[in-house]
Image: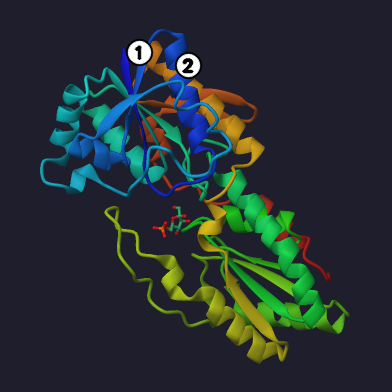
Amino acid sequence: MRIGVLTGGGDCGGLNAAIRAVVIRAARAGHTVVGVRDGWAGMVEGRGAELTVTEVAGIVGLGGTILGSSRTNPDKKPDGMERVRQTFQALGLDALVAIGGDDTLSVAAKLAARGLPVVGVPKTMDNDVNGTDSCIGFETAVERVMEACDNLRTTADSHHRILVLEVMGRAAGWVATEGGLAGGADAILVPEERSTLADVAHHLTHRRDAGYASSIVVVAEGAEIAGLELAEAGGQVDAFGHAQLVTRALGERLAERLGTLTGIEARAMVLGHLQRGGPPSAFDRVLGARLGAAAVDLILAGQYGKAPVLRGMTIVPVDLAETVAVNRTVDLDLYHLAASLTVPV
Ligand code: F6P
């Protein structure tokens, strides 16, 4: 067989481990892998080349994706889906592994529904793909947030400041919740639970009065905070209709207002793409390897229209349609635990 592999959407830690696993698993079974360039753009434009075992040696520790990525939606391009079908033939593909988040997987699900031999692999630092306990890239992002909290604490303590750390995640508060919990944040604000500016200010004032030198506030870029005016999300809207949430200037505005309300000096930091770049965590390398290998196994078993996902400690196949049925928002029990561990009581 000739098995195509692509990575679509925002890059994240662990993608190269998945690509490597696809190539090696396929090669061991006597099959060839074709690396498709830049996500669905490569399938629309017919860009891909054979990817050998030698080429994927030593890439597990690399961030990003050696195949390149894009936020291309073939369904929004003239004849886009038909061109994907033509590229299948032009590259001589018998099957395709699409590694991506809900946008990339939604295209994969549509192609599978039209009879193309496609399987998906869930990746996104947002961790909002339905049906899996974790997506490739999430753990790496959590570690970046944790490290940022650790580093911000020493400077915040030294200057007796509030430090607001804005993190990614779109409409899901997973990165903020787990990153904030791991980093010992003093307030965690997520899209799934509406906070009020007055409550946050009160909590931070209380902390200062109780003698704590600093406060770290981790806020998810998609959070809504009652009493806080934000800019409209703008920037370049991508092919799946997403505006850039960072343009709301949430972290900056929150720090400014908290500073005024509490009388404590406040600063903001947008962690941004540092959450996605650099060496992947061990967890994401292992998850990438397991899911990449499992995707090839599904193909070899003729199980198309599926994606391997993590359930507990086990990898199981689910229908691609299930992975994109809803946006998986944060586990509220976990969020409430994280929120309850911010002191003082
Ligand atoms: O979906 C992944 C993500 O990192 C989101 O958390 C974030 O809002 C968005 O991508 C940023 O996109 P870009 O890389 O286009 O700035």
For numbered disc 2, what is the local secondary structure?
A: helix
Q: Is 290 situated above or below 197?
A: above
Q: Which residue is mark 1?
A: 302
**Which residue is drawn at the image coordinates 22% and 24% (left, top)?**
91
In this picture, residue 268 sits left or right of residue 246: right
For numbered disc 1, what is the local secondary structure?
A: loop
Q: Which residue is mark 2?
A: 25
Amino acid residing under circle 2: Arg
Q: Position of residue 23 (x, y in %)?
A: 44, 21
Location of residue 239 by image quarter = bottom left
Name the quadrant of the N terminus: top left
Name the foreground residue: 337 vs 260. 260
Task: Name the quadrant where ligand 1 sits.
Answer: bottom left
Q: Position of residue 158 (x, y in %)?
A: 81, 78
In this picture, residue 5 sits left or right of residue 182: left
Amino acid residing under circle 1: Gly
Location of residue 315 by image quarter = top right
Q: Nearer the viewer, mark 2 or mark 1?
A: 2
The label shown at residue 312 is none
In this picture, residue 55 sits left or right of residue 219: left
**Residue at the top extreme?**
30
Name the foreground residue: 295 vs 32. 32
